[in-house]
Image (cartoon, helix red, strand yellow):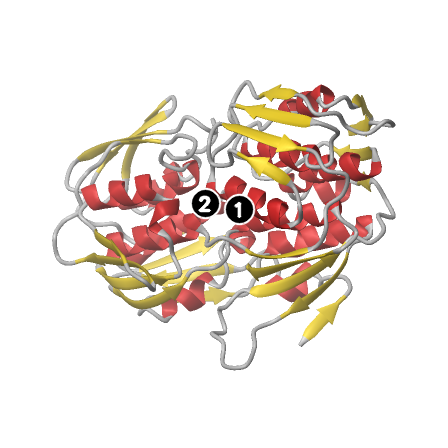
Amino acid sequence: MASRGRPESKSAAFGVHMDSIKVVGGAELNGIIPISGAKNAALPLMIASLLTDETLTLSNVPRLRDVAQLMQILSNHGVDYSVNGKRSGQDELAGQTLNLTAREIVDTTAPYELVSKMRASFWVIGPLVARMREARVSLPGGCAIGTRPVDFFIDGLAALGADIEIEGGYVVVKAPGGLKGARVEFPKISVGATHTIMMAATLADGETELVNAAREPEVVDLARCLKAMGARIEGEGTSTIRIQGVPRLHGAHHAVVPDRIETGTYAMAVAMTGGDVLLQGGRADLLDTALDTLRQAGADITQTNEGIKVYRNGNGIQPVNVTTEPFPGFPTDLQAQFMALMTKAGGSSQITETIFENRFMHVQELARLGAQIHVDGRTATVDGVSMLRGAPVMATDLRASVSLVIAGLAAEGETTVNRVYHLDRGFERLEDKLTRCGAQIERISG
């Protein structure tokens, strides 16, 4: 059944903001968990629909709060969309298909009240100025895990010949003669800036070279989709991407890459609780470093034709030191989950966070469950304990909230995770997927 128009209200679609999740720990996980399409790939792919007046069809799109929010933002610019749900006989957790058509862009302003709710919506600035030669986009909001400045975006667009001013909290970009290809060197690796400038460069006049570009699988996925739309791109997945501008792009069909963060999260849950789970559709090549780290911690991990098998028998969890790094290093988005795992390791481990400065907010919540963690600057030392005990805890951001659920699965007694609206931004039907594998977990509506 296709549905059209604006997405249903957040309260109707996702429950009120004050939902909590109750977990009774102690059960092993056994069974199959289907892996959803990647949120961090789906969002830039949806934004790429602004680059053409033809229909972009995206399959394997996860049903998430951020996806619904971005649909609202895109419809504000004039994007028509339809949503096709699962076909009969399909797994109820299978992804949705979006048809996005920006035949006419009716508004080149992305207002504060929309952008402030989700940082990724700032990325519309690239396609809007590339196609419409102007854009007015609010400075962004988003997760409270540290400053993520937009200077790289602004400097990149300026290098492509755009005139830029900041007026009343808005970035106003104009390129009356169109964007011109140029060499853009990012001072620091930025996934969002790589997405945005790559999209903008597809319609620029001449060749653009992105130096020190992000190599993340989601960047590669966006490049693959843009190429299906007629863009000329090479070097995606390396630190230098070259884009030869074309006059226009056309519609395409593209399947969203599987979510490597969701894959890694469930792999860590199995490593923590013990058990045997197939992460259906998961791809090991998207998170080699994290899976190698899990093997060192004592999990048995194999790639099969169906996905990734994760198994841990009664052997203890081994301590492993990790440092978060841009891809292909250990992902910052799995740091909180790995810390939860290390709270039950047989010894001390050190976890160093190099990407976001405020990303240890889960430490004090894990401590409420009995974890022994000492933070010194950007490094947390985790002394493993033999037992965690359930307690009420509070989610602080998207990945921290799921780390508390993982810890709760392995804790003795009952854990209640409050403020789980963060979870709905990035994990599709978490409770359903875990319940199918034997977890005692339920959502309590606030």
Q: Tell me where residue 2 appears, x and y as whole percent.
A: 69, 73
Compare marks 2 and 1 and give the one earlier in the sequence.
1
Say which of marks 2 and 1 sits in front: 1
Q: Tell me where residue 192 appears, x and y as whole percent.
A: 59, 35
Residue holding disc 2: 399
Residue at 54% across, 60% down: 19
**What is the three-letter code of the residue carrying label 1?**
Asp
**Camera-nearest residue between 70 and 281:** 281
Q: In the current view of this chain or complex, which residue is farthest to the left?
A: 315
Mark 2–mark 1 distance (CA, rounded to whole Å): 22 Å
Q: Tell me where residue 272 appears, x and y as whole percent.
A: 25, 52
**Camera-nearest residue between 384 and 393:** 384
Rendered view: 192 above or below 218: above
Residue holding disc 1: 221
Q: Is residue 93 visible?
A: yes
Q: Which element is circle 1 on?
A: helix
Q: Is residue 138 left or right of residue 220?
A: right
Q: Residues within 10 Å of mark 2 (few under 14, many from 20)?
A: many
Q: Which element is circle 2 on?
A: helix
Q: Which mark is residue 39?
A: none
Q: Is residue 304 left or right of residue 243?
A: left
Numbered label tally: 2
Q: Is residue 259 left or right of residue 108?
A: left
Rendered view: 203 above or below 275: above
**Camera-nearest residue between 115 and 384:** 115
Q: Residues within 10 Å of mark 1 (few under 14, many from 20)?
A: many
